[in-house]
Amino acid sequence: MQVAQSFNITTYVHERAGILDKYYLIKNGSTHNLSLMKSEIDVCYNESILPDSEKRRIAYEWYEERINNNPQSWISYTKNQQKNFLPRSITNVGLEKFKIGIFNSSEDEVLTFEEWENTLYQDQNDGIYRILEAFKGQDLIKFFLRVHPNLSNINNSQTRDIDRLKIQFDNLEVIDAKSIVSTYALIDACDLVITFGSTVGIEAVYRNKPSILMGRAMYEDLGGVIKPSNHEELVLILTNFCFHRTLPDVDNSDLGVIKYGFFQKMYGYDFEYVKPYEAFKVSLIKNGKEIFIKSSFVSRVLKKLNL
């Protein structure tokens, strides 16, 4: 795509949308074009003629669908998780302890895109290491790292580094990618959430949980999340919250939540001839008849592997 654009050739990228019934068709860009997608969120919200109350309802519906594991996209990353299930360790943590949930994402998704470069840390694991190191030996704080389900069955530098973190730090509990622990129950059980770009960052705001963003995300400018300018500021924020229960003020929390959820539900084009039931099950509407389309061998393999 970038090669074609360098020759002034118009490109279109077809991509799945935030819900099954829609698709993206992006001219001279892609969903990995961060500045473009951030702009599209505002355009989608501001140009809609729907009343604010309806925008709110639609947005909240998107969040609730995810919480209730109603798959609306490529695959459901929470389908193997047990609703409301938590590790016994977190339920046994005393009220005097400060519980911080860290939710990572797979590095390779945006590794080659300059806009997505993390200017605060070398990578997510570097950030996690420095956070843990800053509070090493601090008995009042316990960290829970939820490894993104997309990292299941992956053996790379990111997952190997996470294995090393398990051994290095007593103040960390790692919840593996395949764990049945509920992501949303974990959000609720923690006092504060840290993300590096995961959608959990804005979903935590929806659930009225303090949310700190230490990376890039499409929702980064919508409001609601706390965005430290450097690692030292993050440590200060966590220290103040732990000992004094104070946090920096954030603007537009509710509006940011609504804009992002509304975008995910409404942005894109409706399918005219295809009716998706799930990522790998669709039918074709032809001459008033519905014909189910058999998925390709590759698609069936991907579904079996949860990829």
Image (cartoon, grey):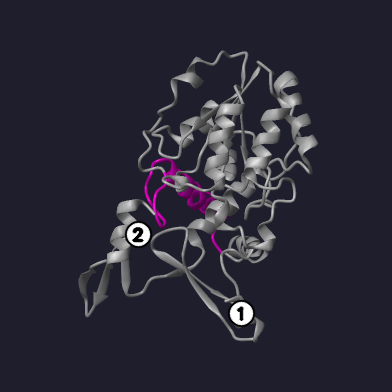
Label 1 sits on a secondary structure element that is: helix
Task: In this rendered view, identify the residue nearer to me: 132 or 76.
Answer: 132
Res 49 → quadrant? bottom right
Picture disc at residue 220: none
What separation in Å lies between label 1 and label 2 (alpha carbons)? Answer: 30 Å
Residue 261 appears at what percent x and percent y?
A: 53, 52
Q: Which residue is mark 2?
A: 279
* Residue that appears at 21% across and 76% down: 288
Mark 2: give few (<14), some (14-19) or many (20+) Cα within 10 Å: some
Mark 1: give few (<14), some (14-19) or many (20+) Cα within 10 Å: few
Q: Is residue 136 magenta?
A: no
Q: Which residue is mark 1?
A: 3
Q: Is residue 63 magenta?
A: yes
Identify the magenta region.
49-77
For the C terminus, the quadrant is bottom left
Residue 110 appears at what percent x and percent y?
A: 59, 58
Q: As shown in the figure, which amino acid type bears the numbered disc 2?
A: Ala
Residue 298 appears at what percent x and percent y?
A: 32, 65
Res 284 → quadrant? bottom left
Task: In this rendered view, identify the residue nearer to me: 227 or 129.
Answer: 129
